[in-house]
Image: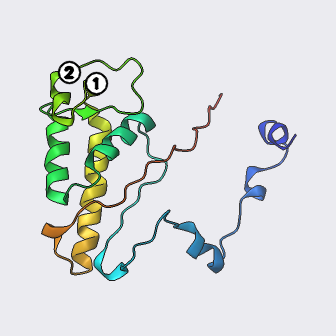
Amino acid sequence: WLKWLLSQRRIPRSSFRRKWHPTLAAAMVKYSREAKNGSKSCKAMGVDLRVHYKNTYETARAIKGMSLRVAQQYLEDVCEKKRCVPFRKYTGCIGRTPQAKEFKMSQGRWPVKSAKILLGLLRNAESNAEFKNLDTENLTITHIQVSMAQQGRRRTF
């Protein structure tokens, strides 16, 4: 009923927006996992990115456990289609490629947009580490998570 009222524009949408409050500021940025030692770790996060969930999930799973430099080089190679991303979970209609033998798989793709988004996140994490005076050569990716973005609104004019 509320959606219908909003779609008919009888009630202004601004009256339903939440007002900003200092107690809400701490809850706005919530990570799914906190580091054991916060002084030796850095974080980066992207929210509601315009990129396919399944491709980004598989790309993130491929770089988990790698060091920062190795992961950046791997993602650049994926963008140039020199190395592929193995698809382990979402394998429906995924073609086979010999490049997936590196991961003992047969199915793989080259999700360029997802790789570029993750490269940007790694660059952000690297700058956060430099800000905290951490050694960027010894950084490893220990936790990476991909969640589905909020659905976009379909507007009719």
Mark seen at residue 62: none
Q: Is residue 157 above or below residue 44?
A: above
- Mark 1 residue crowding within 10 angstroms, few (<14) / some (14–19) / many (20+): many
Name the residue tied to disc 2. 97
Name the residue tied to disc 1. 107
Q: In the image, is 1 to the left or to the right of 83? A: right
Residue under the image location 63 percent in, 32 percent down: 155
- In this view of the protein, can residue 138 be seen by the observer? yes
Residue under the image location 33 percent in, 31 percent down: 87
- As helix, strand or loop, the secondary structure at mark 2 comes to loop
- As helix, strand or loop, the secondary structure at mark 1 comes to loop
Count of marks overlaid on the render: 2
Horizontal and vertical percent position of residue 27: 59, 71
Q: Is residue 102 above or below residue 45?
A: above
Q: What amino acid is labelled 2 in the image?
A: Thr
Q: Quadrant of the C terminus?
A: top right
Horizontal and vertical percent position of residue 134: 21, 77
Horizontal and vertical percent position of residue 129: 25, 73
Residue furthest right in the image: 1
Q: What amino acid is labelled 1 in the image?
A: Gln
